Amino acid sequence: MRVRDELGELFADAEFAEAFGSRGRPGWSPGQLALVTVLQFAENLTDRAAAHRVRYGMDLKYALGLELDDPGFDASVLSEFRTRLVEHGMEEKVLDLLLTALKDRGLVKAGGKQRTDSTRVLAAVRDLNRLELAGETLRAALEALACAAPGWLAGAGPVREWVERYGPRTHSWHPPASTSKREEMALVYGRDGFALLEVVHAPDAPAWLRELPAVQVLRTMWVQNYHRTVAEAGAEVKRRESKDLPPGRLRLASPYDTDARYGLKQGSWWTGYKIHISESCDETDVQDAATGQAMVPGADGPPPRLITSIATTDATVTDAEMTEPVHHMLAARDLLPAEHFLDSGYASAELIVGMKKNFGVTLVTPVLMNSSPQARAGAGFDRTAFTIDWDKRQATCPRGDTSTWWSPVTLRGTKAIVIKFDKETCRPCPVRDQCTRSKTGGRTLSLQPRELQEVLDHARLQQGDEQWRAEYGTRAGIEGTIHQAVAVTGMRRARYLGLHKTHLEHVLSAVALNLIRLDAWWNGHPLDRSRVSHLARLDLSLTA
């Protein structure tokens, strides 16, 4: 109700016109459906529960501008609405409209500070091992063919054997405990899969059968997991070894969600996606100089911390690969920050320089420290002990000797500079054991190109400063946002299949969280309770 009072008609029908035809039977207002869907995620409701709330909830009727006796709609309308948004590439429309309205009110703006982090999202499918994956993929293909062309399938192969072997889902029974029997079962799956693909692609088979999505998934899965050798004695089917499997970005993890991938982060495996959340984080707590206690921000205080960008990828995409796309998304909304707080997974010297040059954004992030043996041991002369003269292309060691070799090279696809000191200079040096572990050669240094190396050295020097560390603590607040998203909207587990629908779910969740935070701000509630004193928090809970 407060959203309606403060923001009015947030989602106008005209904004969704391209996804809805102007002819035919009138349907429900797409603007109203958008608001219902957002409020559905704010309370983590199912489609049926959301439709029930619209039919009987006075608060939702008020928010939607409906009459009290309005009968509402069937729950299936919400699914159709989401499908239309995805088909027309309008996944981010609701977030764009909300941020535009908030920009007009001065609640979000370019400049200032923002922070970004990612978390894993579990796909709406089961985790399957390779044996289960092969069996379930073949079962799904047979089910699709049985529905699409039952008469053709009845004469295409040993249907009775297929029914006995692939009738029940793989999770409804236990595979053999013996390794040899499991290998034998995997080969049986392989031979049956190749046999089915042969009859589907036979000249006398209907051509449209091979275009069925389940059949295409079967073909891809078999290419990735099996190989077949045809000889005079017949065809021999073998399962691929782990080293022969395709890279994770290409490998299918489910026959039902072909966008889901296997992911690994901080030692944790999962099947699904990753989400990257960006939010504003300008200081909102005003300190009372006399008492040192935080004052609770209200409607007249600084704006709340709001989500400005949502990016969804498959589980194999690294954080560093998303640093530039996230800034492109913020630039498209004219919401680029002046300072962007990120963890080390998003940063490199190239990205720090590139984001400053291309977007004018300063990345506030720790970088990897010097990994030389001397730096790791904390003893001896690491790279910082050497003076680099970039103009003369020369390095000077702590004892005043200069390098004799400076060569730009490419190491593992990355440009670098290798500097060497003459072995005749290093061999008689009295501190040689503190400088190099080489028994015969001289000291060698590896540097990045000048601009990158200077940025890297400056960042490493900065992050050792206590003031910088205190400022960087701002980034930790994004963990609370991720927790709120998981606890309130159920973001940890995807509701839908496919990357595009999962991204739509994440965008709707972000808009829901923004509305929850705006409601708290309009009510004068604190937005960052971890920074408010325990006494103030207790007082607020009693008041509520």
Image: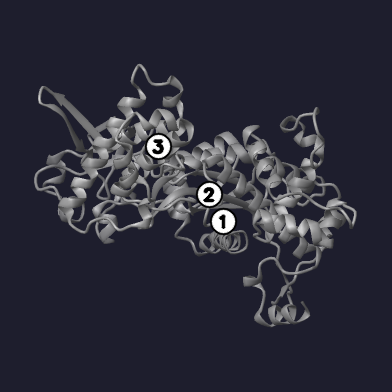
Q: Amino acid at mark 3?
A: Ala
Label 1: element kind:
loop
Can you see residue 302? no
Q: Which residue is mark 1?
A: 491
- Give the camera-side residue of 183 and 270: 183
- Give the camera-side residue of 487 and 170: 170
Residue 294, position as x, y percentages in the image: 70, 73
Q: Label 2, label 3: how many angstroms apart (C-alpha)? A: 31 Å
Q: Quadrant of the C terminus?
A: bottom right
Q: In the rendered view, does 164 fall on the left or right side of 286?
A: left
Q: Mark 1 or 3, which is nearer the eye?
A: 3
Q: Residue furthest top?
A: 203
Question: Who's the residue at 67% across and 41% down the image?
Answer: 80
Mark toward the start of the polypeptide (1 vs 2)? 2
Question: Who's the residue at 48% across and 55% down the image?
Answer: 462
Near mark 1 (Cα within 10 A), the count class, few <14, some 14-19 or many ≥20, is many
Q: Is residue 372 above or below residue 420?
A: below
- Give the camera-side residue of 363 and 137: 137
Label 3: element kind:
helix
Q: Label 1, label 3: how many angstroms apart (C-alpha)? A: 30 Å
Question: Who's the residue at 71% across and 52% down the image?
Answer: 38
Q: Amino acid at mark 1?
A: Met
Q: Quadrant of the N terminus?
A: bottom right
In the rendered structure, are the residues bearing label 1 and label 2 in contact, judged by CB atoms less than 8 Å apart? yes
Q: Which residue is mark 3?
A: 141
Q: Which residue is mark 2?
A: 275
- Give the camera-side residue of 154 and 469: 154
